[in-house]
Image (spheres, grey):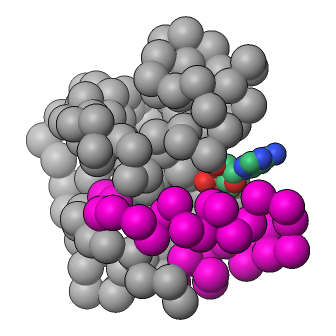
Amino acid sequence: MNQERTLVLIKPDGVQRSLIGEIITRFERKGLKLAGLKLLKLPREKANELYEPHRGKFFYDYLIQFMTSTPIVAIALQGRNAIELVRLVNGATKPAESEPGSIRGDFSIDITHNVVHASDSPENAERELGILFDPGEILEYQRIDEAIIYSPEI
Ligand code: CMP
């Protein structure tokens, strides 16, 4: 059924602001399935690995410092076109471009303290899920509402 998996992180500001439930609810209501979920303090080595594509950019050190400061929530989400849909639910990275109704559009005003992160491609989703989750921590299961969420692919 063309299912994809992607990684979402609720960043330290989202956890500190008690937005965990609000954010997970938005993904659940969209129809996406939780495949993995954990609260953790991101180790510096994992932060460096995760943000390797941004190494050397002017904001890199500040981003790593922020992401390792206090706990985050890591979420593996599964669904049809999950990577693209999750990015829509999250909203644009630039504060002036994140639409009201999106998580960033509703809850953030800053490009670093922007509440959530999500993988931007299938390659990065696989890479990033591998950084945050051991294989046994991502679960394969059927949810009873899938029959009504999805029409068959025709
Ligand atoms: P995220 O989705 O976690 O992926 C990379 C992060 O880098 C991004 O969200 C922002 O928080 C941060 N970022 C991207 N561009 C900039 C920028 N121009 N200035 C500061 N931070 C940035």
* Residue 10 percent coordinates (x, y): 39, 50
The reply to whether the magenta stretch includes residue 56 is: yes
| Point 33% across, 63% down: residue | 70
Q: Is residue 90 visible?
A: yes
Give the total number of marks visible in the rendering.
0
Determine whether 39 is above or below 52 in the image: above
| Point 23% across, 65% down: residue | 39
Quarter that holds the C terminus: top right
Residue at the far left: name it. Answer: 144
Q: Nearer the viewer, residue 5 or 143?
A: 5
Q: Which residues are magenta?
A: 46-73
* Residue 131 percent coordinates (x, y): 49, 82
Q: Nearer the viewer, residue 143 or 17?
A: 17
The reply to whether the magenta stretch includes residue 65 is: yes
* Residue 54 percent coordinates (x, y): 79, 68
Which quarter of the figure has residue 132?
bottom left
| Point 62% across, 14% down: residue | 99
* Residue 64 percent coordinates (x, y): 59, 69
Left-right relation of 128 to 60: left
Residue at the far top: name it. Answer: 100
Q: Nearer the viewer, residue 32 or 68?
A: 68
Left-right relation of 95 to 141: right
| Point 74% across, 20% down: residue | 97
Q: Nearer the viewer, residue 153 or 119?
A: 119
Left-right relation of 148 to 81: left
Q: Is residue 35 visible?
A: no
Which quarter of the figure has residue 65?
bottom right
Which quarter of the figure has residue 125?
bottom right
Determine whether 46 is above or below 66 in the image: below
